[in-house]
Image (spheres, rainbow, N blue to C red):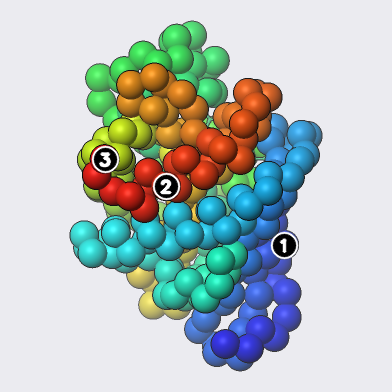
Amino acid sequence: MNVKELLYEGKAKKVFITEQKDRYLIRYKDDATAFNGEKKGTIDGKGAINNTMSAYFFQLLESRGIESHFVEQVSPTEMIVKRVEIIPLEVIVRNIAAGSLSKRLGVAEGTSLKLPVVEFSYKSDELGDPLINDDHILALGLASEEEITILKKKALQINEILSEYLEQSGITLVDFKLEFGKLDNGDILLSDEISPDTCRFWDSTTKERMDKDRFRRDLGNIEEGYKKALERVLGGER
Ligand code: TMP
Ligand code: ASP
C-alpha cells in the first residue's frame, strides 16, 4: 500500500496516511520514553517486537470476538490499520498492584487485587496523562455514558482473554493500557498497541520483568526482556 504522508509522530510510533481513504500505516519505532518523555532512549529491535506482538494479540482477540483496528502486518515494523478517531482516554486494567497504583495507594507491588481494576487516564502529554473518573469523562465530553460502559466491558473481556493466554506461556499479566478508536459510524474498536511498552509482563514463577519497567527502572537486559516476552507469546503453551 502506498504511503502518502506522515500524519502524526508519537513517542513510539509514526502514523502515515495511505492512498486508501479508510486505512493508515503505523510504523513502530525503537525509541523509548518514560515519565512523560523525561527519560529517553533506544531499545534495539523494539519496533519489530511491539509490532509483531500487537499483530498477534489483535488476531487472537479478533478470533475471540473483539474487533480491533488491525488489518495486516506488512513488514517487521509496520502494520495497516483501519482509520479511527482515537478516544483521548487510556484505559488501564490492573490485576496485581504495581507502578502508579502501588505509589498512589501504598499497596506493595505484587499484591493481588481482589478484582480487576479499570482506570481511565486523560490522554494529554501537557498534563502528564492524569487519572480521571467517569464523571470527569462525561463533564468534559470525552465519551458518553454508553461508551464508558462499552470501554469497561471490552477492557475486562480483553483482560480475561490475554491473562488466560499468557498464563499458559508462563507470563502473569500484571496490568496493561489500552486505547480505543471510533469509526465514522460510531463503532468502538480496540486500537493502538499491546506490547511490552504498554503491559507489565512478569515471569509467573520468578517474577522477572519482561516489559518496559526494565527501561523505566534501569534493570538492564532490556532487549532480552522484550525478546523473551515475544518468544513466549508466539510460542503459546510452554
Ligand atoms: P502505571 O502503573 O505507570 O500507571 O502503568 C499502568 C500500565 O499502563 C502499565 O502496564 C504500563 C502502561 N502505561 C502505558 O502504556 N503508557 C503510559 O504512559 C503509562 C504511564 C503506563
Ligand atoms: N510512554 C510514557 C512516556 O514517555 C510513559 C511510560 O510508558 O512510562 O512518557
Please determine whether, in this image, residue 1 is positioned above or below residue 192.
Answer: below
Q: What amino acid type is highlighted by mark number 1?
A: Glu
Q: Residue 129: x and y, percent?
A: 62, 39
- Asked if residue 84 lies left or right of residue 61, the reply is right
Ligand 1 closer than 8 Å to the CB at disc 2?
Answer: no
Q: Nearer the viewer, residue 210 or 163?
A: 210
Q: Are marks 3 and 1 in contact (CB under 8 Å)?
A: no
Which marked residue is nearer to the observer: mark 2 or mark 1?
Answer: 2
Residue 161 spot, x, y in % from top left: 25, 47
How many discs appear? 3
Upstream in sequence: badge 2 or badge 1? 1
Instruction: Give how far across and how far down residue 169 sits, in percent.
Output: 30, 39
Residue placed at 73% from the left, 45% from the top? 42
Give the residue at mark 3.
238
Residue at image coords 53%, 36%:
225
In the picture of the structure, the residue carrying the numbered disc 2 is 231
Assign ligand 2 to one image quadrant: top right
Dot 3: element:
loop
Q: Nearer the viewer, residue 22 or 238?
A: 238
Quick check: 6 above or below 166?
below
The C terminus sits in image quarter: top left
Specify the amino acid type for callout 2: Glu
Q: Residue at the spot x=47%, y=40% of the render?
A: 228
